[in-house]
Image: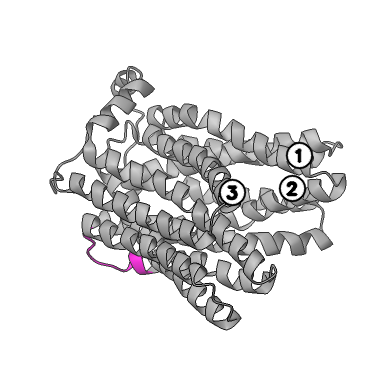
Amino acid sequence: MNTKLVKIFSIFLFGNLTSQALSYMIDWHVLRETGHATDFALIIMLSSLVALIAMPFIGTLVDRKNHKHLLLVAQIFEIVSLLIFFIQPYHNLVVYILLTIALSLANILFLLTMFASVAEIADNDEEMMKINGIQQGISTTFSIIAPPLAGFLLVFVSVRFFALIEIFSAVLVLFVTLSLTIKKTTAATAQASSDEKISFHDVLRFLFQKQLILSLMLVMVSLNFILAAVNIGIPYFITHQFAGNTKLLGIIETGLPIGMILASFISQHLKKIHLLDTLRISYSLVALSIILFGVFAFLDVRNIIFIALTFLLCGLVLGAGQGVSQIPMLTFLQKNISEKIQGRTFSIIDTFAQILVPIGLLMYGFVYDHLNSGSILIVSGLVLLLFIIFISKNFKNYKKDDRYDF
């Protein structure tokens, strides 16, 4: 691994190592101290709502300002927020909500800027794939580690003390970011003046004119909606079929993130990836795994070992399919969309994804209360499969050397 990739690895490693754990610690500390589910839900809802509202504005900022400066601003903002939290004497619900919002905004600014900077950091397509693979692999790994780590740490240290550890991690990321070379920036005066005239509406209109880009965006956000069928359906099935066996559920739930982690590291070592063929195969595997989840649930199998093994395998396939598809798709967008609108493009994708996730959870939560869980999973998988077939028609219009510039 070259020096540049070591720096990227360090940035994502130390950026995720303590921040994800701190986020869980804050949420669970509030729940433990207040004893009210309403307060617990409020801190999550408000931080998510503010992030959703801020996303388009941050995307515009990323498109118009120097990327390296924004990365440094994001880290400094996080450090200052944590220092204020550590120094001031009050630690009530309002303070925890404000800290969570501040950390969320800093994280969005940093990630959106980093995504928009990959083409400027990497020397070639292969290096772009590796950077995206590193980000996805580390992020998914810590999504598994963070919850139990937070639960363990809360027994021994306070949120206030752990905030101090997070400050040291953020400072380390700040210094590594300072040493990172970003070849190009959006900061040229003449260019910046021109970029000011590009509105968010102009970006949306441009993206909707590009069928392939629109197709990829629809695939990315629609998958978040469909996956609610699995996120709600599997725990619901285990609860009713196996009396809420949490050990069985825990085994099954590890399949998807492990599959994504494996896919992340495998994708980094692939020399050549044909994007469109990869997307067809990977999303077809995702759809097939959801259908198989439904078939096994519909058959009403009572053997706990059989369900554990088959559901774990389906989860691995689903995670691998999702992981393999995301890295080349993200790389394609970074390579083919002008740097002038990448920030807003990624903010649009994230915004729609965040909107569709709760809608999907609410819809499937209602449907599972009234229909057979196996049937719902089978239908959801078939819908995704048909959607991929329909979207694939737009792939035929793609020209290999066509850059979607503004």
Quadrant of the snapshot with the N terminus: bottom left
Residue that numbered label 2 is attached to: 26
Gap in Å between the C-alphas at discs 1 and 3? Answer: 29 Å
User: Does dot 2 land on a helix, a strand or a loop?
Assistant: helix
Magenta range: 266-274
Residue 335, image x and y in percent? Answer: 27, 45
User: Does dot 1 land on a helix, a strand or a loop?
Assistant: helix
Task: Tell me if label 2 and label 1 are in contact, CB under 8 Å.
Answer: yes
Task: Tell me if label 1 and label 3 are in contact, CB under 8 Å.
Answer: no
The amino acid on which the numbered mark 3 sits, given as a three-letter code, is Gly
Quadrant of the snapshot with the C terminus: top left
Name the image quarter holding residue 148: bottom right
In the image, residue 42 sits, relative to residue 330, either above or below, namely above
Task: Please tell me which residue lies in front, 6 or 337.
Answer: 337
Residue 337, image x and y in percent? Answer: 27, 38
Residue 74, image x and y in percent? Answer: 55, 38
In the image, residue 141 sits, relative to residue 69, either above or below, namely below
Task: Please tell me which residue lies in front, 93 or 245.
Answer: 245
Mark 2 and mark 1 lie on one chain; the one further toward the N terminus is 2
Question: Residue 130: within the magenta?
Answer: no
Residue that numbered label 1 is attached to: 96
Gap in Å between the C-alphas at discs 2 and 1? Answer: 7 Å
* Structural crowding at the residue carrying mark 1, measured as other residues with C-alpha within 10 Å and reported as few (<14), some (14–19) or many (≥20): some
The amino acid on which the numbered mark 2 sits, given as a three-letter code, is Ile
Rendered image: mark on residue 365: 3
Residue for point 26% across, 58% down: 280
Compared across the picture, whether 261 is left or right of 81 comes to: left
